[in-house]
Image (tube, rainbow, N blue to C red):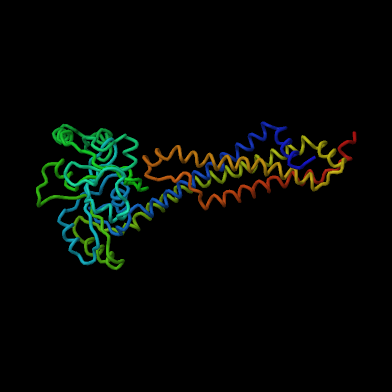
Amino acid sequence: MRLVALVWRNMLHRKTLSLLTILSVTITAALVVFLLLCSEGLEQGAEKGYGPFEVTIGAKGSATQLALNTYYHVGAPTGNVPFTLLSELQKDESVDRAYAMTTGDNYNGFPIVGIEPGYFASRYGTEKQMAEGKMYGKLGETIVGSHIASSLGLHIGDKFQGAHGLIKGLEEAEGEDHEGDSAEEEHHHNFTYTVVGILPPLFTSDDRAVFTTLDYAWAVHEGQDAEHREVTSILIKPKTLLGAQSIKTKYGQMNNVQAIYTSKAVADVVNVIDKGTGALTVVTIICILLAAGTILLSLVAAVNERKKDVALLRLIGKSKGFIWSSLIGEGLLLTVIGLVLGILAGHLGGYLSREAVFEYTGLQLQSFQFMQGEWLLIAGTLGIGILASAGPALQAYRVDPLQLFKS
């Protein structure tokens, strides 16, 4: 009897237990793959999240809040800073590029961001052309991220009105009084935006933002004269690292203004998230141990059920090594089937949930990217399968066939 045929027959003989074992390995592997995808998305998002803008200037407050709002379009801004700061920075010899940003409105929950068009060339390079249409050039013209275009079905020439606040319905959730804001809301509804371009996938949070001219906020929110205009933040690309330190020191000492190292603020956020994922790691380890236990119990049951079968194989001349190999092979076959299904399920789950994950967390899941951590998953799972199979196989290896047929 061929070894492969025997292993396959034995596995099919105990369909329910084999299915449970495969399912246990599949769920564990799928969970690990999905966590790896999220971790990879977090690292890539942190790496690409702020581009070359090593210094960010905004109102005093939380540095991480300033970085998250400016580059990831998450949360509320720390406040506003004078627009005149931009002119000072553009004249500073340590500054290569500086762009002011205005935020505060949304369209269907997606942030409307005012910034000069040169931002895109500085951050993404000139090779990132528009997927459709052209770059905005005058008040009211907008370009939209690829995620917004696909999820809302926006096309070139579409018109829409924005709403006050960074999140649709935020004021209602916070219980604010709207009677004083009715005139402002009416002005929002009277201000029309026109889509003139759609960005290609950039794989950053800019995929879920609407971009327009810097002066949109001043046009929509009346009452800011030219001398007292404010912006939400200023993104700075320094010429050198030494220049970054000079900029931070100089402008960080101004009243009601903070200058932050963007990379440090983003790293602080990533460190907090990494600590939070520790709990998920513990859950994953528990799942791995449960999967190993399931394989072990499955093979122990197999040995107990087939002691006489094992004895007969020994009596017809099959070696102890053959019996050993058949049980090890059964454990490995169950492990491999579960592992393959789990990896496929993990990537498929990442693909199916990528839109929801991106919309709610800003993480881009490269769902069909094979990650280095998967090699460790494969090696570790196969190793656990072999170890879990070794005990029952050793038990069968030591069986005395004559003892089994004695009354």
Say whether residue 61 is left or right of residue 202.
left
Say whether residue 131 is left or right of residue 334.
left
Q: Nearer the viewer, residue 381 or 200?
A: 200
Going 78% across and 36% down the picture, which residue do you hit?
306
Going 16% across and 35% down the picture, which residue do you hit?
181
Tell me the quarter of the image containing the C terminus.
top right
Residue 193 position in % (x across, y down): 20, 38
Tell me the quarter of the image containing the N terminus.
top right
Say whether residue 217 is left or right of residue 244.
left
Q: Nearer the viewer, residue 262 or 149?
A: 149
- How many tags in the picture? 0
Q: To which quarter of the image does residue 340 belong? A: top right
Residue 89 position in % (x across, y down): 19, 61
Q: To which quarter of the image does residue 286 belong? A: top right
Q: Nearer the viewer, residue 240 or 407?
A: 240
- Identify whether 378 is placed above or below 188: below
Say whether residue 282 is left or right of residue 296.
left
Residue 358 position in % (x across, y down): 38, 42
Going 75% across and 46% down the picture, which residue do you hit?
325
Residue 318 position in % (x across, y down): 84, 44
